[in-house]
Structure formats: C-alpha cells, structure tokens
Image: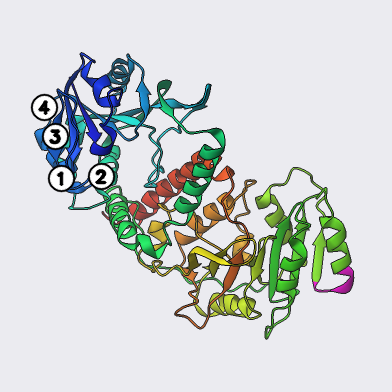
C-alpha cells in the first residue's frame, strides 16, 4: 500500500528509519534516493538513482515508478516513528480525500520530550519553507492527477518538491493531523537553541542573500506558475497614487515605536534627527509604556529637540501595529511616514531625503529601503547589504506572497496609510498585510543602494529575528489566504484569465 522514500543520507544505521519501515507490513517498498555517491543500503531497500531529493526530475521519475497507493516521504534523520503512524496517516487520507497528510511530532532532548505542533495548511501557505514535520504521506493518484492536469514538474534542481506540493494543493487538501506520530532526536538544549537561532537567521535572509540567487529563482518561478494557475497572479498594471489635498504639519515623519530600549534608542533618535533634507520633518517616537529608562531618555531628548515628538499612548494594550496607528493618526504626522526601528541606525544623513524622493517620484504609496546586516559592534555580517535586486514591477507584488517579509526601512504615503489602519500585531506582520494590500493596486518601490541614486539604507542592530516569527506564521498564512482570494476576485471582475 505504501512506498517509503528516504533521502540517501538518512538511510544509514541499524536503528534508522529504513529498518523501521522494513518491519512495517503496510510498507511494500523502501526506496533510498541515491545521487550517485554510493550508499549503504540495509537489506530489503532499493537504491533509486536521482540527481537530488527535491529535484523535478526525481519526483517525475518517482511518480512514474511507484505502483503503491501512497508514498511516505521522509524529511528528517534521527527519527523514531510510531508503529501505527502509517495506519493513522492512511486513515486521515481516506477520510479527507487529501492529496497529502502530515502530522505533529516531538523533539527528544536528553530525557525530556518537547511537543512540536505544526500549522494547518491553507490557501496562503505558499511559502517554500512551510514546515511539514519529519514525514508526509502523499496520495500517488492525487499527485499523478495534478501532473496530468497541470503538466510535469519542470527540471528544477531545488524547487521540484515545492512545485509538486503546490500543484497537488490546487485541487486537493494538504491535511494536518494534529497527533504526534514521530519523535526527532535533538542535541542538548543549548546546542539545539543555537542551531534553531542560526537556522532562523539564515532562513529569514535567504531570499535576499546573493548566494541563494539560483535557488530563489527556481522557487519564484514555481510560485509564479502556481499563482497564474489559481488566478491570483498580479499583472504589472498599477493605479496612480491619488494626491491628497490634506494639509500636513511637515513633509515627513520618522516613526519609531519603542519599549524598553534604553541602550539603543538615543542613537536611533540621533540618527533620525541628523538627517539633511530639503523639506521640514519630525521624529515621532511612540513610547509604549517602557519600564526601564527609555521614557526618561526620550523626555530629555524631546526637551532639547523640538522636532522630536514623544508620544505616551493612553492605551496599554498596544502592539507595534497599534503604536504605528498612534503615530500615523496623530496631528503631528507628516505627509510621508518613514520607519526606523528603535534598535536601528540610518546609515548616513541623506536616507530620509532619498526615501521621500522615491515616494514623490516613483508613483508609489510605499517604498522599501536597503539595509546592511551587522553585529552589535556594527561589523557587517552575512549576507551583508540587502538591496532588493530581485524586486521588479512584474515579480515584486507576486513574490511578496512567498517570502517572509518585505525588508526595511519602509516609507509610506500617510493619506493612503490612514485608509487601512495597522492590525494589532507585531514583528512586521501588520506591515506585511499593508504591503500586500497596497501591492494589489499600486506599485511598491524598492530603493537600491548599489544601483540607484535614491537609495535608503539602515544598519540592522538586531542579529536574529524574534521567536514571534515562528509563532506568527499561521497569521501570516491567513493574511496570504485573504490576499489571494481578493486578487482572484479582482482578476475575475477584470475578466483576466490565468
């Protein structure tokens, strides 16, 4: 009934998953993917020659070769699989008619066990880093039907598996079974935290890391094909940004939400106040009831610098999005609202001018500046300069659905921003929603330090993304789901066909 497929580097060891599968009566074949490096194969396993576990050629060949009803594909090594896992996965697939089924797992660290629940897959779960856990059950019939209907997987080197699951998800469910069916062995708690931290940082910046250019090109192509297939692809046709007749107190405001940043906030404010422009501007700092010396520091700075507007909100339930609303809807806010995080620095004194020039001259309600990744000592660390070279008018608004975020610093047209307030969320989720919404109708402009005279750059003071990045993935996927549905509706109303 099942063909188990294991990448070659996971097949080693007497107690490995291959031996576990061989003892399972529902497993008819165990295929070990062999890229030609020579493998140790436990007795009963078959080598399946391929050019990589996630390539298009590999999955086209597998689906032609396999004769069982299901394929159980293993992602991880050092895994203990529940003896009844295959039965539970098959039962879920039969009950839901799902194209794929995946389940929760736990992590074994020493003598402790840490549950690792996964997210439900939805229409907006098109990011290529979606976590399916250590294994996934694939309906062979659903996969073959998807390829007959939408074409074979292109000869991708890295995006073959991604293309396959997007095609299956077009017509069939990818079902999450909220049961722990496996346990992954981990290293010590400290080593595990370091590995998770490192992987999170690498994944956060992999889209813009030039070392990953070919990988990202393939992922982008697969995502573009999927958006066209489901009628959610945006054509590079943009509305003009309406000119507001509202009178603003200044041309631009640097907006900075802050809470408990006593160590960095003075430098951040100083870099904003030091900007040289041909227009009047101010700096609006929304102090979200800090409990350290942040409030005192800001009050002293505001006494010395009239351009600094120190706002203490009446509400105490505000997230970063709520703090942005406080600034944007205040009477002090300028025609343009420009982001600066309280642990960032503008690099140079012409950043604000360049960002505003981009908003003025490029017919955009939003622009995204370039920035450099640095450590606490302001020393550049990989991937270094993030300059959004891959963002184009044709790909930008579409690829924004696949990637994790849109970078920083961001600058907005205040009048348009006031039409759709920020959500009460944090870590850029609210800005992501706003950006996707704007990209549906308007051009979003990146500014590139290496190629454009209108380049804004910021130095990132924070080495690693917050753990909230992982916690907020379901929300981000929900935002993507809503946006995909809105784009499909817009395209249908316009008479545009895939």
User: Quarter-wise, where is residue 261 in the image?
Assistant: bottom right
Residue hosting label 4 = 67
324 over 388 or under it: above or below: above
The mark lying in front, picked from 4 and 2, is 2
Cα separation between marks 2 and 1:
15 Å
Q: Earlier in the sequence, mark 4 or mark 3?
A: 3
**Segment tinted magenta in the rendering:** 302-307
Label 3 CA crowd tier, 10 Å (few <14, some 14–19, many 20+):
many
Question: Which of these two is toward me, 108 or 337?
Answer: 108
Point out the image quarter for the N terminus. Answer: top left
At a point 24% along the width and 33% down the height, the residue shown is 6
Residue hosting label 1 = 36
Residue 238, given in percent of the width and then of the height, sits at: 42, 68
Circles 2, 1 touching at the beta carbon (< 8 Å): no
Cα separation between marks 4 and 3:
16 Å
Circles 4, 3 touching at the beta carbon (< 8 Å): no
Label 1 CA crowd tier, 10 Å (few <14, some 14–19, many 20+):
few
Question: Which of these two is toward me, 325 or 273?
Answer: 273
Cα separation between marks 1 and 4:
24 Å
Q: Does the magenta segment cover residue 244? A: no
The mark lying in front, picked from 1 and 4, is 1
């Amino acid at each position: 009934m099942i063909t188990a497929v294991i990448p070659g580097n996971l097949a080693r060891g007497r107690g490995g998953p291959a031996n576990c599968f061989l003892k399972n009566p529902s497993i008819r074949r165990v295929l070990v993917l062999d890229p030609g490096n020579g493998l140790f194969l436990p007795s009963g396993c078959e080598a399946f020659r391929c050019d990589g576990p996630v390539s298009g050629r590999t999955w086209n060949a597998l689906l032609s070769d396999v004769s069982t009803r299901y394929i159980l594909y293993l992602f991880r090594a050092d895994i203990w699989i529940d003896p009844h896992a295959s039965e539970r996965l098959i039962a879920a697939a039969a009950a839901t008619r799902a194209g794929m089924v995946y389940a929760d797992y736990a992590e074994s660290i020493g003598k402790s066990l840490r549950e690792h629940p996964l997210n439900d897959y939805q229409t907006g779960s098109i990011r290529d880093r979606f976590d399916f856990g250590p294994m996934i059950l694939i309906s062979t019939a659903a996969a073959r039907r998807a390829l007959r209907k939408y074409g074979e997987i292109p000869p991708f080197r890295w995006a073959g598996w991604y293309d396959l699951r997007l095609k299956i998800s077009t017509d069939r469910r990818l079902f999450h079974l909220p049961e722990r069916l496996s346990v992954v062995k981990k290293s010590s708690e400290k080593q595990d935290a370091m590995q998770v931290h490192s992987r999170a940082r690498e994944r956060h910046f992999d889209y813009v890391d030039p070392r990953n250019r070919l990988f990202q090109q393939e992922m982008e192509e697969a995502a573009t094909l999927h958006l066209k297939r489901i009628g959610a692809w945006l054509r590079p046709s943009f509305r003009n940004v309406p000119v507001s007749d509202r009178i603003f107190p200044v041309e631009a405001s640097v907006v900075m939400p802050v809470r408990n940043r006593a160590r960095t906030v003075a430098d951040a404010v100083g870099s904003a106040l030091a900007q040289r422009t041909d227009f009047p501007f101010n700096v609006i700092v929304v102090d979200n009831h800090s409990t350290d010396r942040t409030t005192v520091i800001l009050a002293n700075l505001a006494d010395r610098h009239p351009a600094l507007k120190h706002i203490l909100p009446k509400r105490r339930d505000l997230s970063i999005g709520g703090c942005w609303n406080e600034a944007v809807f205040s009477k002090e806010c300028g025609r343009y609202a420009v982001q600066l995080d309280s642990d960032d620095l503008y690099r140079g004194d012409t950043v604000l001018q360049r960002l505003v020039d981009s908003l003025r001259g490029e017919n955009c309600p939003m622009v995204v500046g370039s920035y450099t990744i640095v450590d606490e000592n302001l020393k550049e660390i990989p991937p270094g300069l993030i300059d959004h070279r891959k963002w184009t008018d044709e790909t930008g608004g579409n690829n924004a659905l696949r990637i994790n975020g849109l970078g920083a610093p961001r600058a907005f047209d205040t009048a348009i921003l006031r039409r759709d307030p920020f959500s009460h969320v944090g870590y850029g989720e609210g800005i992501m929603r706003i950006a996707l919404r704007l990209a549906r109708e308007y051009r979003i402009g990146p500014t590139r330090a290496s190629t454009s005279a209108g380049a804004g750059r910021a130095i990132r003071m924070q080495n690693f993304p917050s753990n909230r990045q992982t916690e907020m993935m379901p929300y981000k996927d929900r935002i993507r789901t809503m946006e995909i549905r809105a784009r499909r509706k817009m395209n249908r109303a316009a008479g545009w066909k895939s």
